[in-house]
Amino acid sequence: MQRNALLFLRISLGGLMVYWGVDKLINVAHGVTVAQKFYGGLNVATTLMQAFGVAQVALGALIMLGLFSRVTYPVLLLVTGTTMLAVWKSILDPFKLVVQGGNLIFYPSLIIFAGALVLLAFRDVHESSRSSDRLR
């Protein structure tokens, strides 16, 4: 059951990266708006946003396939951790009772980060189940 649960987690988190990346490719303006609002007013050029989209799609696909986990899992943790920090108010106070700027819809960023942490922590279980995979 542990292997199946990790497989499900890997596919779902990898799929999320693919979806986020595709969104940056087909709806570039949305990606730029998100970067400006949640990442400290970061003004990202359209071309750079598309490059991020391509990288995110590639990352997600590699994660879903279970390839290069020694590299992709830490990168996934970095991406999801950055997102989690960007919406910290929503994690600390999603109902805006004390801290203004929170939003319940962004609370799952904490759960997504936790899932990425679990993948990284149990990477050896994944790797032992794919002993024929030489691309780890």
Image (spheres, rainbow, N blue to C red):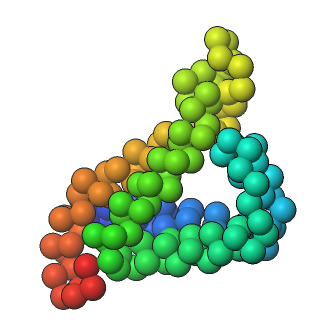
Residue at far top of view: 98
Name the side, left or right, on which 66 lies relative to 79. Answer: left
Can residue 108 be seen from the camera position used here? no
**How many numbered marks, from 0 up?**
0
Q: Is residue 80 left or right of residue 101?
A: left
85 or 93: nearer the viewer: 85
**For residue 128, side relative to residue 88 (left or right):** left
Residue 54 found in image quarter: bottom right
Give the x, y percent position of residue 68: 32, 77
Q: Position of residue 30 (x, y in %)?
A: 80, 58
Which residue corresponds to the image point at 56% horizontal and 74% vertical from the top-left? Answer: 55
| Quadrant where the image shows the C terminus | bottom left
Residue depicted at 44% across the width and 54% down the height: 78
Give the residue at the far right of this rendering: 29
Question: Residue 37: which quarter of the image?
Answer: top right
Residue drawn at 16 percent across, 82 percent down: 131
Residue 27 visible in the picture:
yes
In the image, what residue occupies the spot 69% across and 31% down?
103
User: Can you say which quadrant of the picture contains the N terminus?
Assistant: bottom left
- Along the line of sight, the residue nearer the viewer: 4 or 136: 136
28 up-or-down from 43: above or below? below
> Residue 61's x, y, as percent?
49, 77
Residue 33 image offset from top left, x and y in percent: 80, 52
